[in-house]
Image (cartoon, coloured by chain):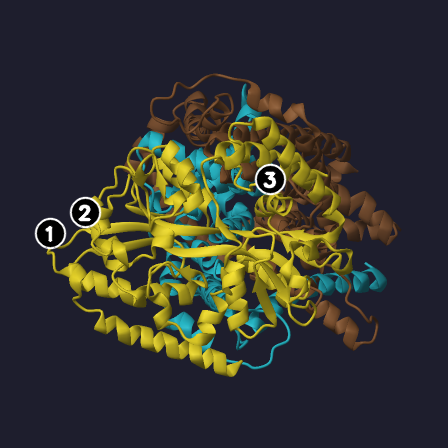
Chain colours: A yellow, B cyan, C brown
Amino acid sequence: MKKLILNRRAFLGTAAATGATLASPAYLRRSYAAGGEVNIWTYANFVPDEFKEQFESETGIKVNVRLVDDQGKQFNLLAAEADNPTVDIMTVAGHRFLQFIDSDLLAPMDPTRLSNWGNINPVYSESDWSTINGNKWGAPILSGMEVFAYNTEVISPEEATTWDTLFSDKYAGQSAYVLQDMLSIVMLMKGYDGNMVAYLDDPEKAAAIVAEARDFLIEKKPLVRKYYDGGAEVQQMFINQDIVMACAWNGPIASLMSDGFPVAMSIPKQGSYGFVYTYNIANNAPNEDNAYTFLNAILASGEIGASMSRASGFISTYKDASQHLTDAEKASTSFPEEELANMRFFRAEANKMKYELVDPAVEEIKAA
Amino acid sequence: MTRHTRLVMSMIYWAFVLYIFVPLILMITMGFKDSKFIGFPIRSWTLDWYVEVFKDSEVLSAFGYSMLIGVSSTLISLVVGIWIAVLLNGRGFIGKGLIYGLTLLPALIPGIISAISFRIYAQLWGIPPGTGAIIWCHAVHNVPFVMLIVAARLSTLPKSHLDAAQDLGADPIIAFLRVTLPYLRPALIGGGIFCMLISFDDFVRSFFLGGYQPTLPVLIFAKLRSGMSPEINAIATVVLVLTGLLGIWAERTTRRMKQGKLQS
Amino acid sequence: MSGKVQTSAATLAGERGAGNRTGEREGRSFWGAIAASQLYQTFSNALLSSPRRQFVILLAFPVLWVLTQHLGPMLQMFYVSFVDAYPVSRGYEQQFTFDNYARFFGSAIFVMPFFRTLAFAATLTLATLVLTYPVAYFLARHVKRSNQMVFLLLLLIPFWVGEIVRTYAIMILLGNNGAVNLALKWLGLIDRPIPFMYTGFSLSVGIIYLSALYMLLPLYSALEKLPRSYTEAAADLGAGPWTRFWKVTLPLSLEGISSGATLVFLISTGYYATPVLLGGPSTTVFAETIAGFFHTAGDEWPTGAAFACLMFVTALAISLAFGRLMTRLQKGVRK
């Protein structure tokens, strides 16, 4: 354990050192009217400190970061500020775009203003969810996925190949999941489209599917220890040995692994969902030009992507970020090809219909 | 009081102290754990998290910021709360019950709803989010608590005291300052500490009304997303020690001021 | 009898209020000077010329404050609970509707957590009262007066660490691999850990921890001002400890119990973070339901606001009824 910590410290050192080598690359050659500021709402560790200092000293643009801790709060905050936002850049998950777009909170993104747009892996930047109404709405920075996380001292890798283990009597009272996310995956387990895009024209079928998934989770309710909400909770439950398996985002589990805790993750054969965090520009952003300058700068190198990935545990969307990660770090943020084939992204097209069905279902499961 | 009941009482008291302090001791202990997460077993110990807290200027400035907000909002709440309590303690008038009810309102609204409604309301009045808005929201939220605590004490103030003061020629303002306010002192200290605590612990209001400078709970929430690390425990411990020192200093100063008064 | 008690209370409180003689003399000259100054005289004459004017001035500020600061945001929420969309997207015409309220009564899934929360809050209020009363009593009666403040502040120390940090500390206390289970195992009392976490038990432990503060302060201030001579007098008259408690101490501390219980009840209906972190699959509280409407989709705000209004009106009604009951009890005591 000691060694891992030392490693972590060492990374911080290299990250700081590479910050210096980042000086004056291409992104700064175009000289903007120096000065001003850019206001960003994002999660802890999503703007690396070294990058921020570098950017501020090179461009004279002051970076104000406001730390947020979930999507709903950003939405509420922005909705309350409505037409005159105080923010330029927000951090929205790809599948939450629609909600923000429908409320007129996001400005369409113009990739031609970002010369470093090409540094993003096209898997993310050109994916089907990323274009809505013919526009791009955000620059992908980090990606996460729903995984089956398990304590390796109790559960075997074979058992981890299927979601059924999560609902087996053998491990009664030792599992945890987020209800909303689990409902989508249960639909997948039952062979349906968890994004519900396929049923946009058939609301009755959609309702029946959600009802089936709901009844399944109600039936399995005696087996679950906790419906949790946050990554920190699921980590604590593993450490306290309150649970031995969970459906979780890969980020928090990757952090547990890198700390030496006996936990592993897999993408079960029935498949799973992933999502992408993107930087978005607010509608009527007060400092739009600075926002583009900032985005172009942060997309400049795989080094920055690696540093974000390392600090957050999520997977970098940058083409060459993995070159800057050690093997241990790669292990906690990558999956075998055959598992990755089961991955799909959350999509937003049917969200209105989906969540009108899913939200009440969640309440009913909790109340059952 | 028989020795028997006294023993039982003190046993309950110490059991309560245990209940209150065991989680606290666990929390402090975990701040020294050499790992990214809190919990058992603790294999090795480190002071690194403390070094990080002091190196990270963000934590200390968030602490100072929370203190500033706590003290300012507490002062406002005390003035308003006492005023309302004095009004309600006086003679009856039409609408007294209504004012009482309205005073309690902010304490009744669930945090998230009060935060959002304040955010919208602030916009209505053109108050920009930031320090002023947080102080204002905390102050409003704490008024009911001050009112309740002060009213409880005020109801025991013998009317003869005020009458005597007025007989001696004091007008109501002087009588209030000379008689009522000193009598309220314990309630004011209690109410003040209470307001400070609530303000210091508040996340949701500070989040919605705040600007780019985080209060301590907002900072801790943001850090929590990447895991409950011993660093957060170290922060909490440092805060604990700092507030403890401030408290002792305040107590000493007031005591010395009192003594100084006696000697002169 | 009660008349006599009242007078002796006045003298006692009087002695305490008068304070130190030296300070008194010095103070008087200071206040005398102020009162006699021309400026103050003009000021006070203008303000206090008649009792009516005094009262209007005393009244004006609180009325203004509660209307603009307390009622304003509340009305905003009330308004939102009757519209079909909020915040409004551009180009959308807002409609007036009762649907948000109808939704609550429409199905049992909302009514259940609603009543569970009320029952839970009431139970916890009682538990907190029973738990903290002896503590407040001990503090007020058995600790030397000069030390009381320090002892009280000591009890408040853990609250400075913040709700979240405290809640995580409770998790590592009660977890399967937590301090309690490890201790029990070490003592040889158990083989396999007892699952304390994510049950009604862990939730109660967390919430009582939070509520204790709100109960302790009013109780302490009520008990602290209760003169010792009362119970001593009762003892002289031959009353046993229980009789003394039931007939003297408890009735005279009703004021504190009333304000403490009201506070704890109201606040515990609104707890959000602790139930979410410490509760289990079947302990969903109503605040969680309400918060859900604000956290998920934007157009759910009106429903959330409507549910919040319902909760608030009910909690208010209950605490008003409770307050009335307590006042009646207190009146009974005075007679």
A81 vs A31, left or right, is right
- Between the residue at mark 1 and the residue at mark 2, the CA separation in whole angstroms equals 9 Å
Residue B97 appears anywhere in the view: yes
The answer to which quarter of the image holds residue A84 is top left
- Between the residue at mark 1 and the residue at mark 3, the CA separation in whole angstroms equals 49 Å
Give the amino acid type for the residue marked by disc 3 in the picture. Ala
Q: Residues within 10 Å of mark 2 (few under 14, many from 20)?
A: some
The residue beneath circle 2 is A289
Let me know if marks 1 and 3 both belong to one chain.
no
Establish if A192 lies above or below B190: above
Instruction: Give the structural element (helix, strand or loop) at label 1.
Output: loop
A215 vs C160, left or right, is right
Instruction: Give the structural element (helix, strand or loop) at label 2.
Output: helix
C107 vs C191, left or right, is left
For disc 1, the chain is A
The residue beneath circle 1 is A33
Give the percent coordinates (x, y) of residue A368: 73, 39
The residue beneath circle 3 is C287
Establish if B217 lies above or below B37: above
Give the amino acid type for the residue marked by disc 1 in the picture. Ala
- Between the residue at mark 3 and the residue at mark 2, the CA separation in whole angstroms equals 41 Å
Establish if C87 lies above or below A182: above
For disc 3, the chain is C
- Say which residue appears at 44% left-offset and 27% top-offset: C86
Q: In the rendered structure, are the residues bearing label 1 and label 2 in contact, judged by CB atoms less than 8 Å apart?
A: yes
Instruction: Give the structural element (helix, strand or loop) at label 3.
Output: helix
Give the percent coordinates (x, y) of residue C190: 82, 70
Let me know if marks 3 and 2 both belong to one chain.
no
* Along the line of sight, the residue nearer the viewer: B249 or A157: A157
- Say which residue appears at 30% left-offset and 39% top-offset: A135
